[in-house]
């Protein structure tokens, strides 16, 4: 025994930094139009972000009995923003 508690996966997760993740998804509801959603969630890894997405869905659709959710993108947001993406005709436009 080396005195460590928990599984190796739990130990690794605790060392990961909290990050922001861009999550894009579609929500299909019974007899209603499909919604295209985009959100930013905080989490240490994909599993953490999925858990937060489930919570967000429960909060946003409390009366729905069944939802079909298709996640099309779940990516961590980079710390450094590429300023060239905001440049218009040589001028920075935030």
Image: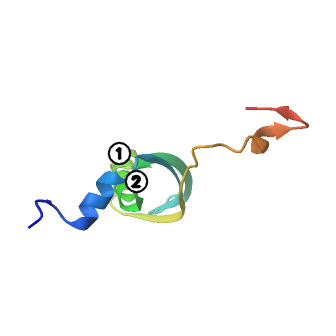
Q: Residue furthest left?
A: 1
- Tell me what residue is drawn at x 36 percent, y 63 percent: 66
Q: Residue at x 80, y 32 (%)?
A: 92
Please give the residue where the numbered disc 1 appears in the rendered image.
59
Residue at the extreme right of the image, as rendered: 89
Q: Residue at x 40, y 48 (%)?
A: 17
Nearest the viewer among 30 and 89 is 89
Q: Establish if 19 lies above or below 29.
A: above
What mark, if any, has residue 22 been given in the picture? Answer: none
Q: Secondary structure at mark 2?
A: helix
**Quadrant occupied by the C terminus:** top right
Q: Earlier in the sequence, mark 1 or mark 2?
A: 2
Q: x and y percent of residue 22 in the render?
A: 54, 51
What secondary structure is found at the residue carrying circle 1? Answer: helix
The image quarter containing residue 6 is: bottom left
Query: Tags 1 and 2 in contact by the CB under 8 Å rule?
Result: no
Q: Residues within 10 Å of mark 1 (few under 14, many from 20)?
A: few
* Side (left or right) of 66 relative to 83: left
The x and y percentages for residue 85 are: 76, 45
Which quadrant: the N terminus?
bottom left
* 38 and 14: which is toward the camera: 14
Callout 2 crowding tier (Cα within 10 Å): few <14, some 14–19, many ≥20: some
Mark 1 and mark 2: span between their CA atoms? 10 Å
* Residue to which mark 2 is pinned: 53
Residue 65 or 40: which is nearer the viewer?
40
- Labels 1, 2: front one: 2
Q: Residue 89: x percent and y percent?
A: 91, 37
* Relative side of 6 to 88, left or right: left
Residue 84 locus on image (x, y percent): 78, 43
Q: In the visual, does 94 lie left or right of 18?
A: right
- The residue lying toward the viewer, choosing from 72 and 92, is 92
């Amino acid at each position: 025994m080396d005195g460590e508690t928990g599984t190796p996966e739990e130990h690794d997760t605790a060392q990961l930094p909290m990050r922001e993740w861009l999550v894009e998804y579609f929500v299909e509801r019974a007899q209603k139009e499909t919604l295209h959603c985009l959100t930013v969630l905080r989490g240490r890894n994909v599993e953490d972000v999925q858990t937060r997405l489930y919570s967000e869905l429960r909060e946003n659709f409390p009366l729905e009995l069944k939802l079909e959710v298709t996640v099309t993108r779940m990516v961590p947001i980079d710390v450094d923003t590429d300023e060239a993406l905001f440049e218009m005709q040589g001028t920075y436009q935030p």
